[in-house]
Image (tube, rainbow, N blue to C red):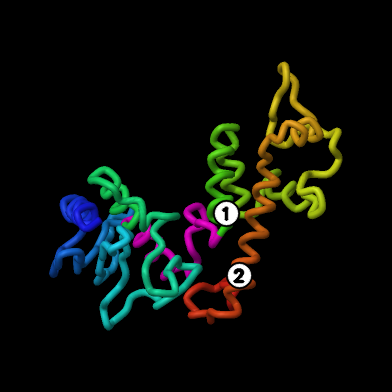
Amino acid sequence: MVGHRKEIFESILSTCPAWTSIRERDEFEIHFIAQIERGSGKLTRAYDLLMKVWTDERVTVQEVSKDRLLPISCPQRHINADETFCVGLRADYSVKDTASAEIWWQRLAVFLACQETAEESRKWPPMLQVSHGEAADLQLEAEELARKLDLAKAYEMAVAYDEGSIAALSKHVSRITGRLPRPRMLCACGYTDNGHVKSRQQCAGDNNLCLPVLEYRRRRAEMSFWREARGRLSCCGAIDDCPLK
């Protein structure tokens, strides 16, 4: 266990990108300054961060400066209740070697760039948002299906802007059946049988995954997350449309 933990740490240390400046390192911790170049060419603010590899091989990163640039905790800005950053779904257990460590650093760079945008606009970048709680797994499942069906852009529009046919149809999914009504209508995702688009009834019988249905489930899971969060979290005021307000 200790040996693998050390391998993870060394993988992260050996792949530190040029936009980091290490202040101090311990056996399983790196205290560093992160300042990345944005799309405009300007540098972000200088983030004072601590990365740690835990005994369970989890990798976390959080802000440690007394003069904080970020909220202590904010679901909308993907900062967990324990102050660690959510840089991607299950990213804290994703580092296994140098290749995955490089991806982890890339995720952190995107996370910090998004924090800059959120600070300026008081909104998280819509096309880079990840759902909360169980809704995140449903979103990833739907995104994978959308890519296979050549509907990736349409699904992005549904999640980011509540626009398009997938978003509209998701609002008609039956809470009782969990499927779209009017079973004789054509499948919303374009599944075919012998060259012909299936009916919704055929898709249901074949257990075909349905994008509007997955989006419906994602939205319900997202609402459940916020209902539960209201009982234990308070709004930090960093995002204008925060459901905790």
Q: Earlier in the sequence, mark 2 or mark 1?
A: 1
> Within the magenta stretch, is there residue 41?
no
Residue 18: tell me if it is visible. no
- Residue at 54% across / 73% down in the picture? 240
Q: Residue at x 54, y 52 (%)?
A: 137
Asked which secondary structure carries label 1, the reply is helix
Residue 14's spot in the image, x, y percent? 16, 51
* Amino acid type of the residue that numbered disc 2 sits on in the rendered structure: Trp
Q: Residue 221: x and y, percent?
A: 63, 60
Tell me where the magenta segment starts and ends, as one range: 109-133
* Magenta run includes residue 113: yes
Quadrant housing residue 65: bottom left
Give the residue number, with chain letter if any, for mark 1. Answer: 160
Residue 8 percent coordinates (x, y): 23, 53
Horizontal arrangement in the rendering, residue 167 relative to residue 128 (left or right): right
Q: Where on the picture, by quarter, is residue 51?
A: bottom left
- Given residues 116 and 134, the one toward you in this image is 134
Between 86 and 190, the one lying in front of the other is: 86
Image quadrant occupied by the C terminus: bottom right
Circle 2 sits on which residue?
A: 226
Whether residue 58 is visible: yes
Label annotation for residue 118: none
Q: Main secondary structure of the magenta part?
A: helix
